[in-house]
Structures are given as structure tokens and as C-alpha cells.
Image (spheres, rainbow, N blue to C red):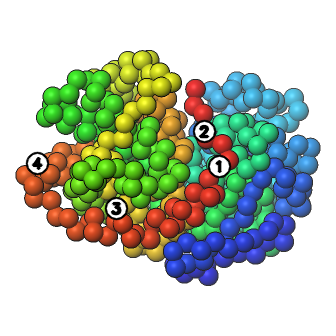
Amino acid sequence: MTQETLDFETTVFDKEYVSLGERREAIVRGGRHLFDRLPAAFEGVQQIGVIGWGSQGPAQAQNLRDSLGDAVKVAVGLREGSNSLQSARAAGFTEKDGTLGEMFQVIAASDMVLLLISDAALAENYREIFAALRPGTTLGLSHGFLLGHLQDVGDTFPHDVDVVAVCPKGMGPSVRALYVQGATVNGAGINASFAVEQDVTGRAVDRALGWSVALGAPFTFGTTLRSEYLSDLSGERAILLGGVHGIVESLYRRYRDRDGLSDHDAFHRSVECVTGPLSRIISKDGLIGVYQSLGAEEKAVFADAYSAAYPVGLELTAEIYDEVSSGNEIRSVILAGKRLSRFPMGKIDQADMWRVGQEVRAERSADGEVPLDPFTSGIFCGIMMAQADFLLEQGHPYSEIANESVIEAVDSLNPYMHARGVAYMVDNCSTTARLGARKWAPRFDYLLTQIAYPAIDDKTVDATPFAAFENHVLHQVLEVCSQMRPSVDIFVQ
């Protein structure tokens, strides 16, 4: 993957470059002041069909409708008899005005089709979906799972349609929440990456960028569809969802069982620390800001925990990435989808610690700030940096690494765990993410408990990982990216 493959040309929006590490990456700044350019971006598009009403569907359909007004019709397509019909109607999409209909009819009638149904449903129905597309249609995806599946089965996209992706760096509810919160604040929204896999009309780039701007993305970064799905599926199984779940459960048990803390104190030092001060500091000042905020003795604790956790994060990220790139993880999701009617996903907040979490959240006060725990911080940052390093080894763009390893975690996902617990965070995401988190969280828990913590207790930690921490290139990347964060913080009820 070279930097040239990530550059692009647009005739509608203003492209600029940012320096991230030793690389230069092209971006487009969004904002509500650009909404008057959307008709030009969507030239030739009379109707955008949003197919599906899962995590991303409601947010994207409503944001697009609100941004486009009367310029382009936005219609939602759902399966006949879908359980989501009533929810779509409640959001203002109706059969009467032609903004709600059966999915294949909406696909056939749309000039731009955004496929936001579950990945398992995409794998099962893609041939029929492709057959319903008219030549010259722009096919839009919000991550590259379908590309991975097509490569796995030896199939391709239709050759007479554009294929683009716009991938918000947050779950659907975050995409909508920040857009609504920012109704009077320019630049409020979730950043996104975009990719162009096929451009048969010559308009694919501008349509993709228009889609991203209309969703409210303050900044849009370039990537490739393959790079996006490799980093996306890997990231959500690692630090974004599965990793953080395994980390906090292992820390809670350690603090309670080894250190003898009360249930509430153990929860404060694990979950509340991660979702509170740790996420806030990383969001504004990066991982280096966490370390710099500690005292001398606390820095030593951080460094030890970081060095012990880093190898666990690197090993598991490499394993996850191999499973994704080989197609194994994609096949696993498809097979799981076929089992869900018989074996539905169970709740993941039934352990005792999550009951304790309900009590802790109920007792929160405005002035009850949780202190930053150096041990928890070192473990979390060690896993996070290991994921970033592995994606860097694989040649991913810095902007993608920063978003999939850091920014999405602290700005979009962790606030949901802070508000209502781990199940609320994980299960507001896609089915693919929910399955992946359930599958991989126990692996992080196990390796931390079996390898990292004993090394710390036995004083056999190899300090090599931390030696590279203070001068790591990711700090500069995050410093630049912090200037591109949403103009408002997400508020989760």
C-alpha cells in the first residue's frame, strides 16, 4: 500500500494535506457550511436508497435526509415484513411519500444504493442485490466486509456500477447523536474514512465525499476498501470492543481478588478509570498525555504495566488480523449468522462486576472524579499501542491507524460503556462487531491473567516495549488528529 493509492481528486470539495509522521495524507474538511455543495456532489442522483435499519441505517438515513433537504430524495429499503418498519416510520420515512419501501424495489429505483444490512445478510443476498442495481448506479458500503467475502468465494462486484465506501469512525447511534448535538455547531459529527473501489461514472469520488459530508463528518480521510475492512474488523475485535471488554474484566478481578479491594473500588479502578479520566486524557492529549500526567512513582507503575501488556496486545492483534485477512473471521461471522435463530447472542453484562457497575453509576456525583490509575492506564495503553504498531507494520495509513486504534475507542465507544455498561457499548454496534467482541474478549482476559499479570508480580517484565514509547510516531499523529476531533463531545443518555 503506497501513499499514492490513497490520494484522490475532487471537483466539488476542497482537498488539503496533513503531515502525519513521515507521510502526507489527503483529507477533506466537512461542515454544515458545505451542505450547499451537496447537489453538485450528487449530480445525476435523484434518489439515495438506504438499505437496512440496524446500527448505521437509522443514523445515516436521517442525517442524509436532514442535510440534503429537497435536493435528493432519501428512501429506506427494508425486507417485506421487517420488524424495523415501525421504527423507520417513527423516524419520518413512510410508504405514502415513497421514502420507505421493500428493499429490492428501493434498490432498483435508486441512483445511489447504500447497503447497510448485516454482513451475514449481504453474504446471503448479494447476488440478488447486484441483479437489482441499474448500470451506472453508485453502490455504497460502510465497511469492506462484502469485498472480503467476494474475494473469499471468487466473485466480484458488477463491472457497470461505482463501488464506494464511507466508513464513520463510530457506531450508528454516535453518528446520529453528534449530528443532532451539533445542529447549531459547525463541525459536529463523526469522522469518516472513504474509499473508491470502482469508478465507472467518473463521479465516484465526489459522490462518496458528498455522502461523508452529508453525514456530518468533520474530516474525511482516504483509504482503500481492503485496508478499511482489515483494520475495521481487526480493531473492533481488539481494543475497540473485544480488547477493552477483556481488559476491564481481568483488571476488576485482579483488584478485587488479589489486592482485596471492595467491589466498588475494583470497578472504579478498572472500568470507571478507562471510560472516565483515561479516555478523556487520550482524546485531548493522546497516550503520551496520560504518561505525562502521572507522578514519578506512578510513571514506573505505568511503564511496568505497559511493557507487560504490549506483547499480549501484539500477539492477539496479529492473530486477529490473520484470521480476518485469511477470510476465516468473515466465514465465522457468516456461519454464526446462520446459527443465530437457534442460538441467539446472550447478554454480556451478567457477571457480578456489571451489577456492581449499575450501582456505581447510580452513585456518581458531579464532583466525584475518578482518579487516573497508573496500572490500569499502562495495561490499556500497552494493548492500544500494540494494535497501532501491528497495523503500522501492515502498511495502513496513519489516519486509519489513529482512528481504528485510538480515536474511535475514546471518542465514540467508551462513552457508551461509561453511560450504561459493556453490553450497551457492544450491542449498539453491528452484528459483526458484536460477534467479534464476544469471541475475542475472553482471549484478552485470559492472556493478561495468565501471562501479563504474573510477569508483573514475579518482576520478570521485559522493559523493551516501553523503551519505544516516549518517542513513538503515534504521539505526533494523535496530536495532529486531535485538532480534527468533533467540535462537541458526544453525550450519551
Q: Residue at x 36, y 66 (%)?
A: 470
Gap between marks 1 and 4, in whole Å? 41 Å
Determine which quarter of the picture holds residue 358: top left
Nearest to N terminus: mark 2 or mark 4: 4
Mark 2 lies on residue: 490
Gap between marks 3 and 2, in whole Å? 26 Å
Residue farthest toward the front in the current orientation of the protein: 296
Nearest to N terminus: mark 1 or mark 3: 3
Q: Amino acid at mark 4?
A: Asp
Residue 463, how many percent across, how many down? 20, 64
* Residue 493 vertical position relative to residue 452 in the rendered view, above or below: above
* Residue 370 vertical position relative to residue 232 in the rendered view, above or below: above
Residue 91, how many percent across, how many down? 75, 29
Q: Nearer the viewer, residue 340 or 434?
A: 434
Mark 4 lies on residue: 457
Q: Residue at x 70, y 54 (%)?
A: 218
